[in-house]
Amino acid sequence: MEGHNVMAAMSVGAAHAVKKAMEQFKIPGTVILSIGPAEEQLMSRPYLVREGYLKDVDAGIITHIQNSLSTGYGLQNYALIGAKFTFKGRTAHGAVNPWDGIDAVDAVELMDIGFDKLREHLRPTYRGHRTITIGGVQPNIIPDVGQIWWFIRDANGPWAKENFDKLVNIARGAALMTGTTMEMEPFGAAWPSLANKAIAEAIQKNIEMVGMPKWTEDETKFAKEVQKSIGTKEVGLASQVSPLRSDTQNTSSNDIGDYTWNVPMGSLRFPSAIPGVQAHHWTAGIAPTTSIAHKGAVVGAKVMAASILDLLTSPELLAAAKKQFELDTKEIKYFSLLPPGAKPPVDLNREMMDKYRPAMRKFYLSKKAEFK
Ligand SMILES: [Zn+2]
Protein backbone atom coordinates (compact mmCIF):
# COMPACT_ATOMS: atom_id res chain seq x y z
CA MET A 1 0.00 0.00 0.00
CA GLU A 2 1.67 3.18 -1.15
CA GLY A 3 -0.20 4.51 -4.16
CA HIS A 4 0.67 2.33 -7.12
CA ASN A 5 -2.76 3.27 -8.48
CA VAL A 6 -1.49 6.85 -8.85
CA MET A 7 1.49 5.59 -10.84
CA ALA A 8 -0.84 4.02 -13.39
CA ALA A 9 -2.99 7.17 -13.65
CA MET A 10 0.05 9.40 -14.02
CA SER A 11 1.49 7.19 -16.78
CA VAL A 12 -1.81 7.10 -18.68
CA GLY A 13 -1.92 10.91 -18.56
CA ALA A 14 1.63 11.11 -19.92
CA ALA A 15 0.88 8.59 -22.67
CA HIS A 16 -2.17 10.60 -23.72
CA ALA A 17 -0.13 13.81 -23.96
CA VAL A 18 2.65 12.10 -25.93
CA LYS A 19 0.16 10.59 -28.37
CA LYS A 20 -1.43 13.99 -28.97
CA ALA A 21 1.96 15.66 -29.54
CA MET A 22 3.08 12.85 -31.89
CA GLU A 23 -0.07 13.29 -33.96
CA GLN A 24 0.03 17.07 -33.99
CA PHE A 25 3.73 17.40 -34.86
CA LYS A 26 3.98 14.20 -36.91
CA ILE A 27 6.67 12.69 -34.70
CA PRO A 28 7.46 9.13 -35.80
CA GLY A 29 7.98 6.33 -33.32
CA THR A 30 6.22 3.84 -31.09
CA VAL A 31 5.52 4.46 -27.43
CA ILE A 32 4.47 1.61 -25.17
CA LEU A 33 2.90 2.01 -21.73
CA SER A 34 3.81 -0.99 -19.60
CA ILE A 35 2.20 -1.52 -16.21
CA GLY A 36 3.74 -4.11 -13.89
CA PRO A 37 1.12 -6.18 -12.08
CA ALA A 38 2.04 -7.66 -8.68
CA GLU A 39 5.05 -5.36 -8.48
CA GLU A 40 5.26 -5.78 -4.71
CA GLN A 41 5.66 -9.52 -5.16
CA LEU A 42 8.24 -8.98 -7.90
CA MET A 43 6.35 -11.26 -10.17
CA SER A 44 5.71 -9.80 -13.60
CA ARG A 45 8.63 -7.98 -15.26
CA PRO A 46 11.16 -10.85 -15.25
CA TYR A 47 8.61 -12.92 -17.19
CA LEU A 48 7.92 -10.10 -19.65
CA VAL A 49 11.66 -9.76 -20.28
CA ARG A 50 12.05 -13.54 -20.64
CA GLU A 51 9.26 -13.59 -23.23
CA GLY A 52 11.01 -10.91 -25.30
CA TYR A 53 8.68 -7.95 -24.73
CA LEU A 54 11.64 -5.56 -24.46
CA LYS A 55 13.47 -6.83 -27.52
CA ASP A 56 12.80 -3.83 -29.76
CA VAL A 57 12.71 -1.11 -27.12
CA ASP A 58 15.33 1.68 -27.46
CA ALA A 59 14.86 3.43 -24.14
CA GLY A 60 12.35 3.89 -21.37
CA ILE A 61 11.42 5.72 -18.19
CA ILE A 62 10.39 3.99 -14.99
CA THR A 63 8.36 5.79 -12.39
CA HIS A 64 7.33 5.55 -8.75
CA ILE A 65 5.20 7.63 -6.40
CA GLN A 66 7.27 9.68 -3.93
CA ASN A 67 7.06 12.88 -1.94
CA SER A 68 9.40 14.72 -4.32
CA LEU A 69 9.65 15.55 -7.99
CA SER A 70 13.02 14.03 -8.69
CA THR A 71 15.23 11.81 -10.75
CA GLY A 72 18.59 10.17 -10.18
CA TYR A 73 21.02 7.73 -11.69
CA GLY A 74 22.97 4.63 -10.78
CA LEU A 75 21.91 1.65 -8.69
CA GLN A 76 18.75 2.29 -6.70
CA ASN A 77 18.06 -0.94 -4.83
CA TYR A 78 18.78 -4.65 -4.42
CA ALA A 79 18.46 -7.89 -6.36
CA LEU A 80 16.05 -10.45 -4.93
CA ILE A 81 15.12 -14.07 -5.52
CA GLY A 82 12.16 -15.52 -3.68
CA ALA A 83 10.71 -19.00 -3.52
CA LYS A 84 8.33 -21.12 -1.50
CA PHE A 85 9.73 -24.48 -0.41
CA THR A 86 7.12 -27.15 0.31
CA PHE A 87 8.11 -30.30 2.16
CA LYS A 88 5.86 -33.34 2.21
CA GLY A 89 6.03 -36.27 4.62
CA ARG A 90 3.53 -38.60 6.28
CA THR A 91 1.11 -37.87 9.06
CA ALA A 92 0.76 -39.98 12.22
CA HIS A 93 -0.49 -39.57 15.79
CA GLY A 94 2.09 -37.64 17.80
CA ALA A 95 1.72 -39.85 20.88
CA VAL A 96 0.42 -43.21 19.61
CA ASN A 97 2.70 -43.93 16.63
CA PRO A 98 5.04 -41.01 15.90
CA TRP A 99 7.60 -43.48 14.45
CA ASP A 100 5.24 -43.97 11.52
CA GLY A 101 5.26 -40.24 10.75
CA ILE A 102 7.55 -38.20 8.51
CA ASP A 103 7.49 -34.66 9.89
CA ALA A 104 7.43 -32.05 7.11
CA VAL A 105 7.69 -29.16 9.57
CA ASP A 106 10.97 -30.64 10.85
CA ALA A 107 12.31 -30.05 7.35
CA VAL A 108 11.09 -26.43 7.49
CA GLU A 109 12.89 -25.94 10.82
CA LEU A 110 16.09 -27.58 9.59
CA MET A 111 16.08 -25.38 6.50
CA ASP A 112 15.74 -22.32 8.73
CA ILE A 113 18.60 -23.47 10.98
CA GLY A 114 20.68 -24.38 7.94
CA PHE A 115 20.38 -20.87 6.54
CA ASP A 116 21.28 -19.38 9.92
CA LYS A 117 24.53 -21.39 9.78
CA LEU A 118 25.19 -20.02 6.29
CA ARG A 119 24.66 -16.37 7.29
CA GLU A 120 28.21 -15.94 8.62
CA HIS A 121 29.64 -16.96 5.26
CA LEU A 122 27.65 -14.63 3.03
CA ARG A 123 28.84 -11.19 1.93
CA PRO A 124 27.89 -8.48 4.44
CA THR A 125 25.64 -6.96 1.76
CA TYR A 126 23.21 -9.92 1.73
CA ARG A 127 19.68 -9.92 3.13
CA GLY A 128 17.77 -13.15 3.89
CA HIS A 129 14.30 -13.32 5.43
CA ARG A 130 11.56 -15.88 5.60
CA THR A 131 8.11 -16.66 6.86
CA ILE A 132 6.71 -20.09 7.68
CA THR A 133 3.55 -20.32 5.60
CA ILE A 134 2.50 -23.85 6.58
CA GLY A 135 3.52 -24.96 10.06
CA GLY A 136 1.22 -27.82 11.01
CA VAL A 137 -2.28 -28.09 12.45
CA GLN A 138 -2.01 -29.08 16.12
CA PRO A 139 0.68 -30.63 18.31
CA ASN A 140 -0.60 -34.21 18.36
CA ILE A 141 -0.63 -34.51 14.58
CA ILE A 142 2.68 -35.17 12.86
CA PRO A 143 2.42 -32.69 9.96
CA ASP A 144 2.62 -34.22 6.51
CA VAL A 145 3.15 -30.83 4.89
CA GLY A 146 5.28 -27.83 5.78
CA GLN A 147 6.15 -24.71 3.82
CA ILE A 148 8.64 -21.86 4.19
CA TRP A 149 8.83 -18.78 1.95
CA TRP A 150 12.20 -17.05 1.48
CA PHE A 151 13.41 -13.73 0.07
CA ILE A 152 17.16 -13.72 -0.62
CA ARG A 153 18.75 -10.43 -1.64
CA ASP A 154 22.13 -8.94 -2.46
CA ALA A 155 23.63 -5.89 -4.10
CA ASN A 156 23.66 -7.39 -7.59
CA GLY A 157 22.02 -10.17 -9.61
CA PRO A 158 24.92 -12.65 -9.66
CA TRP A 159 25.47 -12.38 -5.89
CA ALA A 160 21.77 -12.90 -5.16
CA LYS A 161 21.85 -15.98 -7.41
CA GLU A 162 24.90 -17.33 -5.58
CA ASN A 163 23.15 -16.99 -2.20
CA PHE A 164 19.94 -18.46 -3.53
CA ASP A 165 21.68 -21.54 -4.97
CA LYS A 166 23.11 -22.20 -1.50
CA LEU A 167 19.62 -21.87 -0.03
CA VAL A 168 18.31 -24.48 -2.49
CA ASN A 169 21.05 -26.87 -1.38
CA ILE A 170 20.02 -26.33 2.24
CA ALA A 171 16.43 -27.22 1.28
CA ARG A 172 17.66 -30.41 -0.41
CA GLY A 173 19.65 -31.24 2.71
CA ALA A 174 16.62 -30.68 4.95
CA ALA A 175 14.56 -33.03 2.78
CA LEU A 176 17.29 -35.68 2.88
CA MET A 177 17.66 -35.42 6.66
CA THR A 178 13.95 -35.86 7.27
CA GLY A 179 13.00 -38.22 4.46
CA THR A 180 10.53 -35.70 3.07
CA THR A 181 10.11 -34.59 -0.53
CA MET A 182 10.88 -30.97 -1.43
CA GLU A 183 9.29 -28.83 -4.10
CA MET A 184 10.39 -25.30 -4.93
CA GLU A 185 8.02 -22.73 -6.36
CA PRO A 186 9.65 -19.46 -7.49
CA PHE A 187 8.01 -16.39 -6.00
CA GLY A 188 9.77 -13.25 -7.07
CA ALA A 189 12.93 -12.40 -8.96
CA ALA A 190 14.42 -8.99 -9.53
CA TRP A 191 17.59 -7.24 -10.54
CA PRO A 192 18.49 -3.98 -8.80
CA SER A 193 17.13 -0.95 -10.65
CA LEU A 194 19.83 0.82 -12.62
CA ALA A 195 18.90 4.35 -13.68
CA ASN A 196 20.57 5.89 -16.73
CA LYS A 197 22.48 9.14 -16.19
CA ALA A 198 21.98 10.61 -19.68
CA ILE A 199 18.20 10.17 -19.43
CA ALA A 200 18.27 11.51 -15.85
CA GLU A 201 19.85 14.74 -17.12
CA ALA A 202 17.07 15.13 -19.70
CA ILE A 203 14.40 14.42 -17.06
CA GLN A 204 15.99 16.94 -14.67
CA LYS A 205 15.66 19.74 -17.26
CA ASN A 206 11.96 18.94 -17.57
CA ILE A 207 11.54 18.75 -13.79
CA GLU A 208 12.96 22.25 -13.51
CA MET A 209 10.72 23.48 -16.32
CA VAL A 210 7.50 22.02 -14.85
CA GLY A 211 8.22 22.65 -11.16
CA MET A 212 6.35 21.53 -8.05
CA PRO A 213 2.57 21.82 -7.68
CA LYS A 214 1.22 24.88 -5.86
CA TRP A 215 -0.17 23.39 -2.68
CA THR A 216 -3.11 25.09 -0.98
CA GLU A 217 -3.05 25.94 2.72
CA ASP A 218 -5.54 23.13 3.32
CA GLU A 219 -3.32 20.57 1.63
CA THR A 220 -0.28 21.63 3.66
CA LYS A 221 -2.33 21.64 6.87
CA PHE A 222 -3.68 18.19 6.09
CA ALA A 223 -0.17 16.82 5.42
CA LYS A 224 1.00 18.25 8.77
CA GLU A 225 -1.92 16.64 10.56
CA VAL A 226 -1.04 13.25 9.05
CA GLN A 227 2.62 13.77 10.01
CA LYS A 228 1.63 14.71 13.57
CA SER A 229 -0.59 11.63 13.89
CA ILE A 230 2.24 9.27 12.95
CA GLY A 231 4.79 11.07 15.14
CA THR A 232 7.03 12.34 12.37
CA LYS A 233 8.32 15.89 11.72
CA GLU A 234 5.52 18.27 10.72
CA VAL A 235 7.19 19.55 7.56
CA GLY A 236 4.11 19.69 5.34
CA LEU A 237 4.68 19.13 1.62
CA ALA A 238 7.82 19.64 -0.46
CA SER A 239 7.79 22.96 -2.30
CA GLN A 240 11.05 22.76 -4.26
CA VAL A 241 12.08 20.30 -6.94
CA SER A 242 15.03 18.12 -6.00
CA PRO A 243 18.46 18.58 -7.62
CA LEU A 244 19.91 15.85 -9.82
CA ARG A 245 21.99 13.41 -7.82
CA SER A 246 23.34 9.90 -8.00
CA ASP A 247 20.97 7.51 -6.24
CA THR A 248 21.97 5.69 -3.07
CA GLN A 249 21.41 1.95 -3.31
CA ASN A 250 18.82 0.86 -0.76
CA THR A 251 18.14 -2.74 0.24
CA SER A 252 14.56 -3.03 -1.02
CA SER A 253 13.74 -4.55 -4.43
CA ASN A 254 11.42 -3.90 -7.33
CA ASP A 255 11.05 -6.08 -10.41
CA ILE A 256 11.31 -3.05 -12.69
CA GLY A 257 15.04 -3.69 -12.19
CA ASP A 258 14.95 -6.38 -14.86
CA TYR A 259 13.93 -3.77 -17.44
CA THR A 260 16.81 -1.51 -16.53
CA TRP A 261 19.46 -4.15 -17.35
CA ASN A 262 17.97 -4.73 -20.79
CA VAL A 263 17.19 -1.22 -21.99
CA PRO A 264 18.51 2.26 -21.00
CA MET A 265 15.96 3.50 -18.45
CA GLY A 266 15.50 6.85 -16.79
CA SER A 267 13.76 7.08 -13.45
CA LEU A 268 11.15 9.64 -12.40
CA ARG A 269 9.61 10.08 -8.95
CA PHE A 270 6.61 12.34 -8.59
CA PRO A 271 5.18 14.12 -5.51
CA SER A 272 1.91 12.36 -4.68
CA ALA A 273 2.86 11.13 -1.21
CA ILE A 274 3.20 12.89 2.14
CA PRO A 275 6.79 13.24 3.42
CA GLY A 276 7.58 11.07 6.44
CA VAL A 277 4.86 8.48 5.76
CA GLN A 278 6.25 4.94 5.63
CA ALA A 279 5.57 3.09 2.36
CA HIS A 280 3.49 -0.08 2.83
CA HIS A 281 2.01 1.27 6.07
CA TRP A 282 -1.74 1.86 5.85
CA THR A 283 -1.20 5.62 6.27
CA ALA A 284 0.50 5.59 2.84
CA GLY A 285 -2.98 4.93 1.46
CA ILE A 286 -4.26 8.34 2.64
CA ALA A 287 -2.58 10.73 0.18
CA PRO A 288 -3.68 8.79 -2.95
CA THR A 289 -7.30 9.66 -2.10
CA THR A 290 -6.63 13.40 -1.95
CA SER A 291 -5.92 16.35 -4.25
CA ILE A 292 -2.25 16.07 -3.18
CA ALA A 293 -1.87 12.86 -5.20
CA HIS A 294 -3.79 14.33 -8.11
CA LYS A 295 -1.62 17.44 -8.34
CA GLY A 296 1.55 15.37 -7.93
CA ALA A 297 0.47 13.04 -10.71
CA VAL A 298 -0.26 15.96 -13.05
CA VAL A 299 3.26 17.44 -12.70
CA GLY A 300 4.69 13.92 -12.94
CA ALA A 301 2.79 13.26 -16.17
CA LYS A 302 4.03 16.54 -17.65
CA VAL A 303 7.66 15.70 -16.89
CA MET A 304 7.21 12.13 -18.14
CA ALA A 305 5.59 13.27 -21.40
CA ALA A 306 8.24 15.94 -22.05
CA SER A 307 11.04 13.45 -21.38
CA ILE A 308 9.57 10.81 -23.69
CA LEU A 309 9.22 13.45 -26.40
CA ASP A 310 12.90 14.34 -25.85
CA LEU A 311 13.83 10.69 -26.36
CA LEU A 312 11.68 10.52 -29.50
CA THR A 313 13.07 13.68 -31.07
CA SER A 314 16.71 13.77 -30.01
CA PRO A 315 18.96 11.13 -31.59
CA GLU A 316 21.84 12.62 -29.57
CA LEU A 317 20.06 11.91 -26.30
CA LEU A 318 19.24 8.37 -27.37
CA ALA A 319 22.87 7.77 -28.40
CA ALA A 320 24.14 9.17 -25.09
CA ALA A 321 21.69 6.94 -23.19
CA LYS A 322 22.86 3.87 -25.09
CA LYS A 323 26.51 4.73 -24.50
CA GLN A 324 25.86 5.17 -20.77
CA PHE A 325 23.99 1.85 -20.72
CA GLU A 326 26.93 0.03 -22.32
CA LEU A 327 29.25 1.52 -19.72
CA ASP A 328 26.95 0.63 -16.80
CA THR A 329 26.48 -2.97 -17.93
CA LYS A 330 30.05 -3.66 -19.04
CA GLU A 331 31.04 -5.76 -16.03
CA ILE A 332 27.75 -7.42 -15.13
CA LYS A 333 25.58 -8.92 -17.86
CA TYR A 334 21.91 -9.64 -17.43
CA PHE A 335 20.60 -13.17 -17.11
CA SER A 336 17.20 -14.21 -15.84
CA LEU A 337 17.07 -14.92 -12.13
CA LEU A 338 14.00 -17.07 -12.71
CA PRO A 339 14.66 -20.78 -12.38
CA PRO A 340 14.36 -22.53 -15.77
CA GLY A 341 10.77 -23.39 -16.61
CA ALA A 342 9.33 -21.02 -13.96
CA LYS A 343 5.75 -20.07 -14.79
CA PRO A 344 4.16 -16.73 -13.81
CA PRO A 345 1.84 -17.30 -10.82
CA VAL A 346 -1.24 -15.77 -12.40
CA ASP A 347 -3.43 -16.99 -9.53
CA LEU A 348 -1.43 -15.00 -7.01
CA ASN A 349 -3.76 -12.92 -4.79
CA ARG A 350 -6.85 -14.24 -6.61
CA GLU A 351 -8.56 -15.40 -3.42
CA MET A 352 -7.81 -12.14 -1.61
CA MET A 353 -8.97 -10.03 -4.56
CA ASP A 354 -12.17 -12.06 -4.92
CA LYS A 355 -12.85 -11.35 -1.27
CA TYR A 356 -12.13 -7.61 -1.23
CA ARG A 357 -12.98 -6.44 -4.75
CA PRO A 358 -16.76 -6.31 -4.15
CA ALA A 359 -16.18 -4.33 -0.94
CA MET A 360 -13.93 -1.85 -2.79
CA ARG A 361 -16.28 -1.47 -5.73
CA LYS A 362 -18.46 1.12 -3.99
CA PHE A 363 -15.44 3.44 -3.71
CA TYR A 364 -14.67 3.36 -7.43
CA LEU A 365 -14.88 6.70 -9.20
CA SER A 366 -17.47 6.73 -11.93
CA LYS A 367 -16.13 9.93 -13.47
CA LYS A 368 -14.67 9.71 -16.94
CA ALA A 369 -11.06 10.80 -17.23
CA GLU A 370 -10.70 14.19 -18.85
CA PHE A 371 -7.53 15.48 -20.48
CA LYS A 372 -7.28 19.19 -21.00
ZN1 LIG B 1 6.14 0.57 -4.84
Image: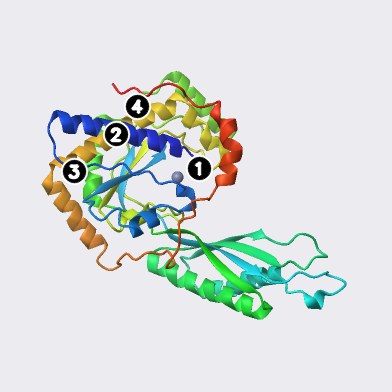
Quadrant containing ligand 1 reads: top left
Residue at point 53%, 50% (across, down): 348
- How packed is label 3: few (under 14 Cα within 10 Å), some, or many (20 or more)? many
User: Residue 305's quadrant in the figure?
Assistant: top left
The residue where tag 4 is placed is 213
Amino acid bearing label 2 = Ala
The residue where tag 1 is placed is 279
Q: Is residue 50 left or right of residue 175?
A: left
Amino acid bearing label 3 = Leu
The residue where tag 3 is placed is 311
Q: Earlier in the sequence, mark 1 or mark 4?
A: 4
Does the beta carbon of the residue at mark 1 sit less than 8 Å from ligand 1?
A: yes
User: Residue 19's quadrant in the figure?
Assistant: top left
Q: Nearer the viewer, mark 4 or mark 2?
A: 2
Could you tell me how far apart the alpha carbons at marks 1 and 4 are, in whole angstroms?
21 Å
Could you tell me how far apart the alpha carbons at marks 1 and 2 are, in whole angstroms?
24 Å
- The answer to whether residue 120 shows anywhere in this view is no
Q: Say whether marks 3 and 1 touch (CB < 8 Å).
A: no
Q: Earlier in the sequence, mark 4 or mark 3?
A: 4
Residue at point 39%, 56% (across, down): 47
Could you tell me how far apart the alpha carbons at marks 4 and 2 are, in whole angstroms?
16 Å
Spot occupied by residue 324 in the image (x, y as percentages of width and height): 21, 56
The residue where tag 2 is placed is 14
Q: Earlier in the sequence, mark 1 or mark 2?
A: 2
Report the front residue among 161 and 155.
Answer: 161
